[in-house]
Amino acid sequence: MNANNMKFLYAGIMIALVISVLAPFLASSDPDGLESAAGGVIDEARMAELEESEPVVGSPMPDYAIEGLGKGGEVAAIALGTLAVLGISFGFGKAFNKKA
Amino acid sequence: MHIPDAFIPLNQAIVYWVIALPFILMSMKWAKNELDEMKVPILAALAAGIFAIQAMNIPIGMGTSGHMVGATLVAIVFASPWAGVLVLTLVLLVQGFAFGDGGITTMGANILNMGVISGFVGYYTYAALRKSLSANIAAFGGAWLGLFMSAIVCAVQMTVAGTFPLKEGLIAMGTFHLIIGFIGEGLITAIVISAIARSRPDLLENKFGAGSERTDTEAFV
């Protein structure tokens, strides 16, 4: 483990966690490019049908929120996701990296 | 651009999974052959940062927002589009299973669009531009085109799925992602690349310099 690369990791974690805390307050709640395009090009009845359809597999924190916890829950959900991605990619990298 | 389950019929969604799978396996092979232990913290830092920034939707007007994808950024830092595929696969897995952002059936299509198309188009555009332009501008151009092309492919998939009409779908997806690519992808990628160039120039040196480690994909550039 190179010390400079560990510094890069800590800086990355700090930046990612700051974004996690800010995102629920700063992020736009407007539909994204795909949803917005869908709203414009699909007729209303079909769009309503698509919007009502449930995901095939349910998720524990849909829409980056924790039920009943409001903005704090959103911060926690995004921070948890950030740490999960961090842990998985670190573990994956360790398991799969080039063996000297 | 995360496609939900309902937007693609299951049989087509499976086809995209089948196409995506060899790319995912190749990205793991890349990790096995090219990712040395020293670089694991860099990969993890970028993956965490990309997950977080994908939650930060930026308004682009027209009642629409968009966020960075990040495959080009990762590909530039690791001098390989496979790194972008790998990180986006890990990010999309967590987004899909933990947060319902992007369907599970459509995850193959999402990995294909945001990991493979965006990463490959972005990285090779960057590499081509880098020959005559500064790293910042090349990164901007690559990231912008990578995102734009993945949106165009997504619009075609939506047409094949019977969800969008072709022309209207292409115009709407193209217009929104032209702008999202400009702000959300191009600008942020260029800013991060210039920050890395200032603080850790060694990370970006291995690409066009001689004698340092190179990836097999660079042979094509």
Image (cartoon, rainbow, N blue to C red):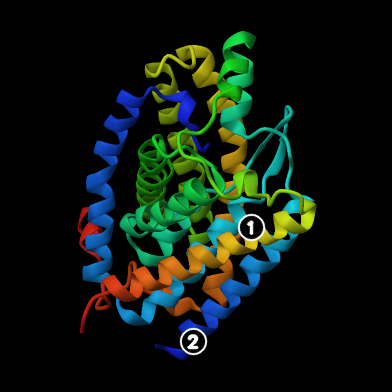
Q: Is residue B61 left or right of residue B85?
A: right
In the image, residue B24 lies at what x, y percent?
Answer: 28, 51
Residue A71, horizontal then vertical, whole percent: 78, 53
Q: Where is residue B125 shown, x and y percent of the image?
A: 39, 47
Label 1 secondary element: helix
Location of the C terminus of chain B by quadrant is bottom left
Q: Nearer the viewer, residue B70 or A25?
A: A25
Q: Is residue B221 visible?
A: no
- Residue depicted at x 23% and y 57%: B217
Residue drawn at x 71%, y 54% as measured from the top left: A74
Callout count:
2
Label 1 neighbourhood size at 10 Å, few (<14), some (14-19), many (20+)?
A: many
Q: What residue appears at the point 26 percent right and 48 percent down from the top-left corner?
A: B23
Left or right position of A61 against B119? right
Q: Are marks 1 and 2 in contact (CB under 8 Å)?
A: no
Disc 1 marks which amino acid? Ile
Q: CA distance from mark 1 to mark 2?
A: 27 Å
Q: Residue at x 63, y 19 (%)?
A: A39
> In the figure, residue A21 lies in which quadrant?
bottom right
Q: Amino acid at mark 2?
A: Asn
Q: Position of residue B127 (x, y in %)?
A: 37, 55
The picture quadrant where one finds residue B26 is bottom left
Q: Earlier in the sequence, mark 1 or mark 2?
A: 2
Q: Nearer the viewer, mark 1 or mark 2?
A: 1
Task: Looking at the picture, tell me which residue is in the foreground, B141 or A86.
Answer: A86
Q: Secondary structure at mark 2?
A: helix
Which one is nearer the viewer's eye here, B212 or A5?
A5
Residue A4, label in figure = 2
Chain at tag 1: A
| Residue nearest the viewer, comparing B129 with B189 | B189
Residue indicated by mark 1: A78
Name the subunit of mark 2. A
